Image (spheres, rainbow, N blue to C red):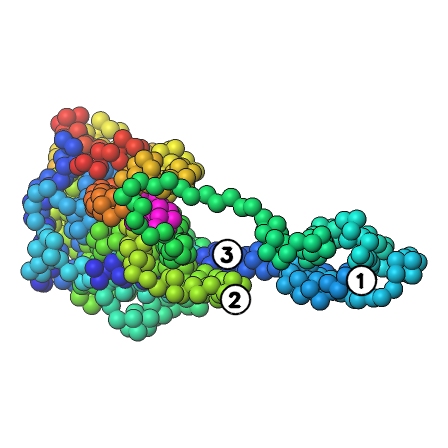
Amino acid sequence: MDTMLTVDQLGKSFKEKKIIENISFDVRRGEIMAVLGPNGAGKSTTIRSIMGIMYPDEGSITFHSHKSGKIPRHKIGYLPEERGLYKNVTILDILLYFAELKEYPAAKAKERARFYLKKFGLEGKEKASIEELSKGMGQKVQFIASIIHEPELLILDEPFSGLDPVSLELFKKEIQELAKNGTAILLSSHQMNVVEELCDRLFMIHRGQKVLYGTIDEVKKQYASFKCVIYGENSKRVLGQISDVQRIEQEGDRSVLYLSQNLSLPAWLKKLPETVDIQELVIDRVSLHEIFIDIATDKSTMQEAGERYA
Amino acid sequence: MRNSFKVAKWEVKRNIKNKSFLISLILTPVLFLVFFTVPTLFGDDEKKSTATNKVTVIIQDELGVYNEIDSIIKQQNAIHWALKQTDRTEKEMVPELETAKNTVFVSLTEEALAAGKINVWMSEGANANFLQQAAVIEPPLRALQLERAGLNSEQIEMISQRIGFKSIPVKKQAEKTEPEPTEDPMKKLVPGAFAGVVLFSIVMTGMMIFQSASQEKKEKVAEIILSSVTPADLMQGKIIGYFVLGLTQVFVWMAFVIPLIIWRFDVPIFNYLLVPELALLLFIALSGYLLFASLFVGIGATVEDISTSSNFQGMLFMLPFMPFIFIGPILSNPEGLAAQIGSYIPFTAPGVLLIRLSIMERWPWIEILIALVILTASIWLFMKLAGKVFQTGILMYGKNATPKEIWKWMWS
């Protein structure tokens, strides 16, 4: 896949405080890339720097071969986290205005606006003002506004916040379709299950610095070990005797065992003591959600479990 | 710059379609028309009623001055008499007047002339002001009285002439040779007033920039727009857009007002308006707009909710009205110290200059030049500072900026 956007050694400070530091990643044509991180981690600052709304103090951004300051912004679509629309103007007028700002031909924009309004269940609402629409409908219009000009790179800052499950599915499907058609997508989200399902790669920032970068599988492999869920009546003492268990969480007859990294699963399974009551056993990698919580709360699952049960 | 025009076009389009703007655009000249024409309509009624209620003035003319009186009355616009001549005497006429209405009988006899007392018999409904109006026929009667007294025509003319007082201002020796000013005051006043209307209108619509920037921040649209255009483009676009809206307002108003003035007062307004001086006056008006627009757009970007903004932001709206402080001193002395000071303060300069240049016969070119240099430099500085404030302020969500923060952004 061609690299469309390259962020290299990006850094930005406010007053004396470093907001982001040494941020480097790339986004490729046709892929969905996630930027993750807890609130205040520096995601929006990174995105705003890419969009040229903020000026980074260090590093560079390259879109195709265009360097910062010369990036053709009409080839990029953007849905900011803090978003809204003009209240007393018709939806079609707003969409056409945004298309005009992106130098997209009016006739084509009108056609696309109508197509997407229909696709998102807003047919016949062209002449309605945003005040007349529900919040969800408003979000759909905002999404249409970000893609009306057929951008090559689409940046979505928290696109799923506040969406109902039906709209969420619609957005996911549309994002996947755009990527399939070659659009490079960079999105930030706090919904880890969606990211896990949708994204090809991720970049996680914490306190302005990179903590994770790679494909979902690579990240899980690199950062997270397996977890074993056992249903059965077991005491923590018995489970604590199992080798390579770093932490145990118990709730009724459900016990979750967080295992050490780089262990061989078949070998570990063979070593399970006879005394363990197993009604049901599930082995899975730790979810992205758990990795996120771990990083955001500065808690290393493995270390904690190791200290307690080693 | 292309993006600025796109923003400007959008601002114009969105406001032109806005009902409240349209209402104010049309309603203002309509109200003006109403205020202008309604009193005139009443005035016409008054005219009509006076025409129909013309007082009938019957004159017994023993003295042979009827024709002279008739021509005097015809020259008086404010006096509406229906003159009639009669040979009948007082004794015959008075009983008739008992039943008549709005009729006056004036007995001009030799006896009355000699006595210097002329009887005026008034019927029911005759106006009490009649005696004041009757003073206009006094000169021919006085002349006749003097003639009867034996004076020749030269003497009569001399006595008839009133003694008048004429004021002659003492001027400096150097100025004595100058010809008396004979220039028509309208020549300066009309273009000045026009530029004043332009300034007022564009500054008023300029205030809408504040609202527009603040609203864009509140409705969180700014970030989407700024992903396509630079903050400078957005700011310039707003300034240009509201300038066009202001001018549209002026044109619509003028389309109503100019024909009305021509019709009512028969003033050749275009002859007065289309003069070279108008260019300078309009330049001053435009400068005033740019100065205030930069202020409004910059500070507008710092306010999300006008109702909770500090007094500091509210004070800004007072600035365009500052020239009114100087109106009294300027009218009494357009070349005085107050007028000069007002010309050099950027916020008051446009208004003060327009007032001064509208009433001064000779323009103080050096002062104008200094004032314009100060004004242009101020516009440059304010635009720069507004740009910095706008850039930071428009993306700050959830609160209004404090004056301290604004100060910091300006010099960052």
The chain carrying label 1 is: B
Q: Residue B28 carries which label?
A: 3
In front of the other: label 1 or label 2?
Answer: 1
Residue found at x 56% / y 58%: B36
Q: In this view, does A36 lie above or below A244?
A: below
Q: Residue B263 carries which label?
A: 2
Q: Which mark is residue B62?
A: 1
In the picture, the quarter occupied by the N terminus of chain B is bottom left
Instruction: Check contact, mark 1 vs mark 2: CB within 8 A.
Output: no
Q: Is residue B173 left or right of residue B33?
A: left
Q: Position of residue B257 (x, y in %)?
A: 48, 62
Q: Where is residue A278 in the image (x, y as percent from the top left)?
A: 26, 40
Q: In this view, does B88 lie to the left or right of B145?
A: right
Q: Is residue B56 above or below residue B205?
A: below
The stretch in magenta equals B349-363
Q: Can residue B334 be seen in this view?
A: yes
Q: In this view, does A209 lie above or below A136?
A: above
Q: Which mark is residue A105?
A: none
Lower position in the chain sequence, tag 3 or tag 1:
3
Q: Give A264 or A77, whichever is nearer the viewer.
A: A77
In front of the other: label 3 or label 1?
Answer: 1
Q: In which quarter of the image is residue A18?
A: top left
Q: Give A164 or B405, whichever is nearer the viewer.
A: B405
Q: Is residue A45 above or below residue A107?
A: above
Q: Is mark 2 on a helix, strand or loop?
A: helix
Q: Where is residue B132 in the image (x, y as percent from the top left)?
A: 71, 50
In front of the other: label 3 or label 2?
Answer: 2
Q: Give A289 or A183, whichever is nearer the viewer.
A: A183
